[in-house]
Image: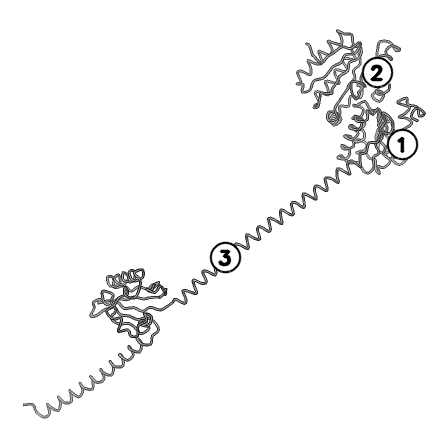
Amino acid sequence: MEWNGIQKLENLLLVSVPRDLSDDEVLRLRRAVLQAVRQYDSQIVVLDFAQVDICDSFFGRFIYSTSQMVQMMGAQTIMAGLQDAVIETMVELGMVLSDVPAVLDLDDALALSRTMTQTFATDGEKPPPEDGDETTEM
Amino acid sequence: MATIAELQARIEALEQENIRLREEKERLETDSWLFRTLMTYVPDYVYFKDRDSRFIMASAAHAKSFDLSSPDEMVGKSDFDFFTEEHARPAYEDEQRVIETGEPITLEEKETRPDGSIAWVLTTKMPLLKAGEIVGTFGISKDITERKNVEEQIKVLNATLEARVNERTAELAREMTERQKAEEEHTRLQQEIINAQKLAIQELSTPIIPIVDQIIVMPLVGSIDTARARDIMRALLEGISAHRAKVAILDITGVPLVDTGVAAHLNKTIQAARLKGTHTIVTGISDAVAETIVDLGIDWSAIETLRNLQTGLIVALKRLNIRFENLL
C-alpha cells in the first residue's frame, strides 16, 4: 500500500493525513504507517492534520490506536496542525488523547522531535512515556 | 172608454213613475258630479281606453302631465302620441295582454316623454267590461318619480358611501402595512444593534493579551455559561495560532463563582489548548475559590493552578527557559 503523504526524513516519518477519509481508507492509512515505521526503522511519527477539517469518533480512535501501535513498535507519535474546529469536536466528544503529544504545526513538530531524539540518545533507545502536560517542554 | 177611476189610477201610476224617474235622475246627477269631481281633482292619472289603447277619457291631472289644457284633447289618441316608442310599445303590449286574459296587472313604469324627461309611475291596469264583454282597459297611475328619484339618490349615495368605505379601508390597510414595515425595520435595527453589542461584548469578554514571546494571558471576567465557554475556547485557540503561544495563562480573578459547570468548561478549554501544543496555567485562584473547588470534589490536580498572575508569569517564563534579564 503506497501513500503519497508518507515521507521519511532521517529518523522521522512524516504522515500528511488527507481530508475526507472514509473509514476504510483510515484503516489502510494506519496499516501503511505501521509498514513504513518497520521499513525505515523510524523513531518518531508526525501525524500532520493540517488538511483535516472534519472529525468523528472513528477518526479519534484512529489517532489513538495508531499512536499506541507505533509506541508498541518502539516509536513515538506527535500530533501536529489540528484545526480549531476539529479540536472543538474532539473535546466535545471527550477524545483528548492526553498520552499523545500535540503541537501547533510541522515547525514545532520538528523542534519537539529534536528534543526527543536528544532524550533518546541520553536515555537509550526506548523513548520515555510522555506526560500530556510536559509535551511542550523544550 | 176608461172610467174616471181607471184614469185616476193611471195618473197616480204616472206620478209615481215621475217621482221614480226624478229620483233616478237626481241619483245619476250625483254620480256624475262625483265622477267628474274625481276626474277633475284627483292628482293621479285615471284613464279609460278602447281595445286599440286609444283614450276614451282621462283625468285632468293626466292631461296636465301632457301639457294639455283639457282631457278632451286626449280622446282618440294613444300612448304613441305622447311617449317615445320605448315606453309606448311595452305599455300597449301590457294593455293588450289585459284585454286577452281579463287579468288586472300592477307595475312600475318608466315613462320617457318626447322632450326627454323621465317619469316613474305605479300603474294598475284593469279590463274595461260592458255587458260582460271586454271593450277596453282602464287604469290608474300614481306618479312616483320623486320617490324613485330619492331611491336613485339613495342608491347613488350608498354606492358613494361604499366606495368611500372601500377607499378608507384600503387606506387603512396601506397604513397598517406601512406601520408593520416600519415596525419590522425598527425590530431589525434593534436586532442589529443587539448583535453588534453582543459582538462587542464577546470581543471584550474574551481578550487575548500577548505579554512575552510565546506567552499569552487571557483574563476572564464575569460568569461563565456554556455559550461563553465556547467563545472563550474559540478565542483561545485563535490566539494560540496568532501568537504561536506555548503557554496560555487563564486568569480567573474576575470570575465570581467557580462551580462544577465552570470547572468542566475550563477543563475542556485546557484540553483543547493542549491539542495545539499549548500548556495552560490557571491563575487567580482565591482562597474562597480553592475552598469551593475542593469542597465540591472537583479534581483539578492535573491542571497547574496558581494564586495570582505574577506567580503564573514567573512559572511560565521558567517553563520556557526565558530569563527576565533577556527580556530587558
Residue type of the residue flagged with mark 2 = Pro
Report the chain holding disc 1.
B
Residue A48 in the image: x percent, y percent? Answer: 75, 18
- Is B47 situated above or below A61? below
Tell me which label, 1 or 3, sits earlier in the chain.
3
Q: Which residue is mark 3?
A: B162
| Secondary structure under the numbered disc 1 in the rendered image | helix
Report the chain holding disc 2.
A
Q: CA distance from mark 2 to mark 3?
A: 92 Å
| Secondary structure under the numbered disc 2 in the rendered image | loop
* For residue B318, side relative to residue A96 (left or right): right
Q: Nearer the viewer, mark 2 or mark 3?
A: 3
Q: Which residue is mark 1?
A: B309
Residue type of the residue flagged with mark 3 = Glu
Residue at 81% of width from left, 22% of height from top?
B277
Tell me if mark 1 has few (under 14), some (14-19) or many (20+) residues whose alpha carbon lies within 10 angstroms of its own. many
Q: Which residue is mark 2?
A: A129
| Secondary structure under the numbered disc 3 in the rendered image | helix
